[in-house]
Image: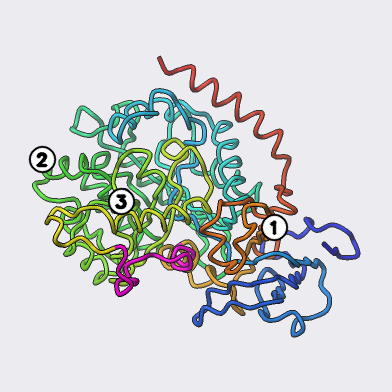
């Protein structure tokens, strides 16, 4: 890698407000996957960015010769930064917790609620940094965090400040739970909040932090947790506030059959129909999971513009089911990808999720539908090739698909005027050996590898396979102590 005269490739300031970012030139990549409108894949190519914004994408010979920071990407593939549309970064504190290893969603939640409610702001800091670091090392540049448990003085500010330390592009929810066990909800009463306090703090966070401008590093979302942990009033009031201030809405929906049984019992309708009564099926809403939906509900999402976030590893981990991702895409439903919380996935590797999304969509082809074997697709019939999710489709979901879900047109592809968010993979890695007849597909079909470089807004967050914005080893050591203290609470 070449560097500027000052020799410091990580000195570029992150704050785009009032601070001039250095120029960056990335060149000689074997392949550049643009994800632009034409889905161009360029060879011996790269990009030039100024102030964190791409000015030019093209073959190397057409790019400028110099910049403050120059990356020689010979032997690399360059892709748009991956976009994580659903996570619970605090759950990095409780991944692999024995009490939650072998169970499905509702008992899994009961095993974790009080542990999450007992965390401190210091716990949150290390969890967010560790989770975002793992994501950045997998090529992720934009992270959405669904934070919804606030006790012991914790605020969403804790997530915001920690994400700023590592330098990812961040969207975070002022999430909420208000429906405790005594009122028919799932969470314990001592883990939920007063609804007036929730709404007051939601307003504070929006006014203090939300930045809707192009290139924004920080946006706020309102996200009441789920149909079984908040009231209908809180859902409605959150939607009103979000629409008054132009922020997006998010919740868990149709994740498990337990949830469906819950809404049928308590609301007399399926989860999607319940959302309709609350004005929560709209183009400013996206749902995590959306596994158990029927064809009419898929068409409703498409008609109303609602988005979904597919979380394949978590859905397998908790035996939740397989989301109909191909059906969503075929119906032009906005579809993104998420790792979900690290306590229901045990990892925050978004490149793994790209691969799992492709493989699960293929598995779904071969499963017997309820109607019987006469409707099973033939997996060997070349005329049904459109039923197979391809590697490039899986990458689309994780890039431009995620941008659409988050309502952003400034990220998700490598194009002039968009944010300089990208990552590179070293094609000389042993995992790709023998698979380079199609290097783009190799990124998904072959074993996921660590990003060599991850760049957010023109700034290197990962350089030569290591996080360079902070001392990650120190944070990991502190995080392990925090996690051990919380795990000791579980009897």
- The relative height of residue 369 versus residue 66 in the rendered view (above or below) is above
Looking at the image, is mark 2 or mark 3 earlier in the sequence?
2
Q: Residue furthest left?
A: 268
Q: Quadrant of residue 27?
A: bottom right
Left or right: 486 with respect to 435?
Answer: left
Q: CA distance from mark 2 to mark 3?
A: 24 Å
Q: Is residue 263 left or right of residue 7?
A: left
In the rendered image, residue 388 lying in the magenta stretch gets the answer: yes
Residue 249, image quadrant: bottom left
Q: Secondary structure at mark 3?
A: loop
Q: Position of residue 421 (x, y in %)?
A: 62, 65
Kindly identify the residue that appears in the image at 24 percent across and 45 percent down: 227
Q: Residues within 10 Å of mark 3 (few under 14, many from 20)?
A: many
Q: CA distance from mark 1 to mark 2?
A: 50 Å
Looking at the image, residue 225 lies above or below residue 275: above
Residue 265 is labelled as 2
481 horizontally vs 459: left or right: left
Q: Main secondary structure of the magenta part?
A: helix
| Pointer 1 residue | 453
* Applied colour scheme: rainbow
Question: Dot 1: few (<14), some (14–19), or many (≥20) neighbours within 10 Å?
Answer: many
Tell me the mark number nearer the camera, choosing from 2 and 3: 3
Report the magenta residues as a range.
379-397
Q: In this rendering, which labeled residue sits more in front, label 1 or label 2?
A: 1
Identity of the residue drawn at 52% across and 29% down: 120
Q: Which residue is mark 3?
A: 322
Front-most of 213 and 440? 440
């Amino acid at each position: 890698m070449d560097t500027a005269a000052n020799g410091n490739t990580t000195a570029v300031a992150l704050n785009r407000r009032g601070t001039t970012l250095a120029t960056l030139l990335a060149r000689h990549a074997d392949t550049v996957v643009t994800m632009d409108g034409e889905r161009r894949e360029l060879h011996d190519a790269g990009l030039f960015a100024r102030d964190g914004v791409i000015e030019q994408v093209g073959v190397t010979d057409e790019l400028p010769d110099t910049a403050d920071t120059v990356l020689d990407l010979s032997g690399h593939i360059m892709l748009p930064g991956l976009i994580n549309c659903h996570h619970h970064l605090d759950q990095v504190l409780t991944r692999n917790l024995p009490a939650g290893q072998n169970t499905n969603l509702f008992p899994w939640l009961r095993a974790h609620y009080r542990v999450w409610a007992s965390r401190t702001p210091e716990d949150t800091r290390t969890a967010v940094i560790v989770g975002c670091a793992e994501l950045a090392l997998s090529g992720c540049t934009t992270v959405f965090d669904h934070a919804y448990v606030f006790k012991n003085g914790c605020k969403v500010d804790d997530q915001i400040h920690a994400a700023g330390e590592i330098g990812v592009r961040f969207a975070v929810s002022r999430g909420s739970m208000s429906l405790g066990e005594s009122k028919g909800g799932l969470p314990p009463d001592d883990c939920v909040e007063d609804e007036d306090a929730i709404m007051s703090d939601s307003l504070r966070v929006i006014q203090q932090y939300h930045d809707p401008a192009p290139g924004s590093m920080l946006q706020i979302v309102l996200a009441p947790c789920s149909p079984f942990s908040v009231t209908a009033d809180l859902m409605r009031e959150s939607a009103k506030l979000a629409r008054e201030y132009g922020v997006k809405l998010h919740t868990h929906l149709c994740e498990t059959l337990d949830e469906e049984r819950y809404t049928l019992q308590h609301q007399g309708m399926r989860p999607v129909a319940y959302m309709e009564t609350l004005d929560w099926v709209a183009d400013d809403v996206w749902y995590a999971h959306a596994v158990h939906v029927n064809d009419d509900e898929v068409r409703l999402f498409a008609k109303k513009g609602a988005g979904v976030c597919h979380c394949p590893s978590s859905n397998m981990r908790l035996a939740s089911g397989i989301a109909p991702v191909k059906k969503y895409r075929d119906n032009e439903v906005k579809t993104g990808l998420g790792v979900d919380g690290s306590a229901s996935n045990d990892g925050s590797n978004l490149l793994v999720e790209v691969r799992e999304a492709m493989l699960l969509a293929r598995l779904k082809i071969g499963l017997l539908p309820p109607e019987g074997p006469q409707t099973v697709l033939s997996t060997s019939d070349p005329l049904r090739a459109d039923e197979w999710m391809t590697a490039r489709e899986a990458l689309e979901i994780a890039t431009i698909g995620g941008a659409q879900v988050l309502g952003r047109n400034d990220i998700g592809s490598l194009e002039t005027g968009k944010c300089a968010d990208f990552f590179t993979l070293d094609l000389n890695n042993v995992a790709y050996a023998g698979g380079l007849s199609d290097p783009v597909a190799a990124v998904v079909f072959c074993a996921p590898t660590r990003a060599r470089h991850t760049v957010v807004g023109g700034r290197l967050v990962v350089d030569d396979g290591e996080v360079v914005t902070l001392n990650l080893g120190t944070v990991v050591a502190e995080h392990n102590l925090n996690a051990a203290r919380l795990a000791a609470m579980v009897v």
